[in-house]
Amino acid sequence: MLTALELRALLGLVFLYATRMLGLFMVLPVLVLHAPEYQGATAFTIGLSLGIYGLSQGLLQIPFGLASDRWGRKPLIVLGILLFVAGSLVAAAAEDVLSLILGRALQGAGAVSGVLMALLADVTREQVRTRAMAAVGGSIGLAFALAMVLGPLIASHWGMDAVFWVTAALGVLGLPVLLAIPSPVSAAGRESGPIPQLLGRVLRDPELLRLDLGIFVLHFAQMATWISIPVLLEQVAGFERAHHWYLYLGTMAGGFLLMVPFVWYGETRRRLKPIFLGAIALLAVAEVVIARAGAGLGVMVAGLLLFFTAFNLLEATLPSLVSKRSPAGIKGSALGVYSTSQFLGAFCGGAVGGLAAQAFGWGGVFWLAAGAALVWLGVASGMRPPRRLSSLTLPAAAGDVPGYDELVGVVRGVEDVIHVPGQGTTYLQVDEDVLDSGHLERVLGRRPTP
């Protein structure tokens, strides 16, 4: 159960995270439709403006996280909010596509997603932290759904610049909300942030790399798909742009309802790998169906329903798999690389998708996304089925670590040993299904902390 202070912190951070992502997502369903309003706009430059925030986000996620360890979470979050608001104002005033690209890049430069999660870790207890982080993660899906509705509504009534003005206003509202969040006494959840000495270990882990590729491809496909979807709805399906949100809302709601039983089955029946691979295959099928949308509106609706089912399922499953694969000591570093991959995927999806649309037409984008999903399916097929791994904490001096390293292969169920530099803490990654707890306690001479 969350305490009153933890609940207040969680609600504040959910607001900050959700409104930030809402502002970034609202342009997806409308920007390509308003491209003629910007001097020098082409399919490529509009795609670049959609995705460029991902480049600045991806490059600055880990530096912001490291800086927050040194100078504090809140000062870095304030800096990120100010950059986000400045970028929104530049984009709102833009009359040419280069100014639009600059504004979107500035929006992304306030790369504080990881810092927000680290602050959440600092102000919550270990036993409720996973649920709190899941709530913040769930806000991304809610923000995406609201953006698909609010973006077309705002742009159709007040113009494209109004979307960016609303985004700037949401950013400003975040400042008093941040001040109301309790300040951490200490960086208790520091392992939730990236640790430079452990990044190499994360980058050498084939299972984590598969998941990093997965989030890259998922957001590559998301960004590339929305370069063409709004145009096809108008040109092929004859949908008025003011009514696009009807279709988005209906297919997103249907996709969410279809996704829920698969998530439940995969988690409760320990069948997460086949569900995961099936969702990747469904993403590829959805892109192919949308590519055939010239056959009529019904095909487009079917394709979007399949897309949102696959997207929601994968968006919910990937963080769970990263968490299952990462011991506590390297979880922050693993999530840092994971977030960087996500944002770089969005950048590449916008830029490469724009090039594909310019070279091969609007339908070419979907074939590109389908091909990327099939590559991901091939790579993911070699993943090991996720096990019930958890972490145990051992306070340790650096000199104790060699002895702990010997636990792997000696005590049944101990899978890995991770020492966090500079923290005097060692984490054991254990398989709960086979762990010999009694043997572990006898070897250590004490009971490890969950």
Image (spheres, helix red, strand yellow):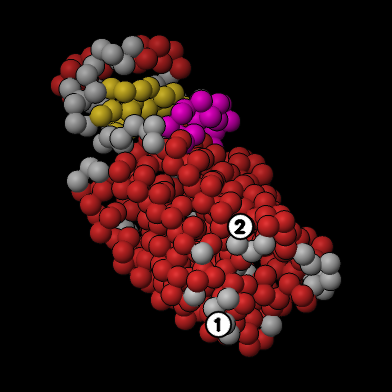
Decide: is 80 above or below 155. above
Mark 2: which amino acid? Val
Residue found at x 70% / y 68%? 88
User: Which quadrant would residue 449 be assigned to in this image?
Assistant: top left
Tag 1 or tag 2, which sits nearer the N-term?
1
Res. 183 visible in picture: yes
Q: Residue furthest bottom?
A: 157
Secondary structure under tag 1 reads loop
Mark 1: which amino acid? Phe
For this view, does 443 lie left or right of residue 139?
left
Return the residue at label 1: 239
Residue found at x 23% / y 52%? 265
Decide: is 330 above or below 139. above
* Residue 196 is one of the magenta-drawn residues: yes
Q: Which mark is residue 207?
A: none
Q: Residues within 10 Å of mark 2 (few under 14, many from 20)?
A: many
Residue found at x 43% / y 75%? 298
Q: Which residues are magenta?
A: 190-210
Decide: is 360 above or below 429. below
- Out of 418 and 367, give the one closest to the viewer: 367
Provide the major secondary structure of the magenta segment.
helix
Decide: is 392 above or below 103. above
Return the residue at label 2: 365
Across and down, in percent, residue 51 comes to 66, 57
Across and down, in percent, residue 430 comes to 28, 28
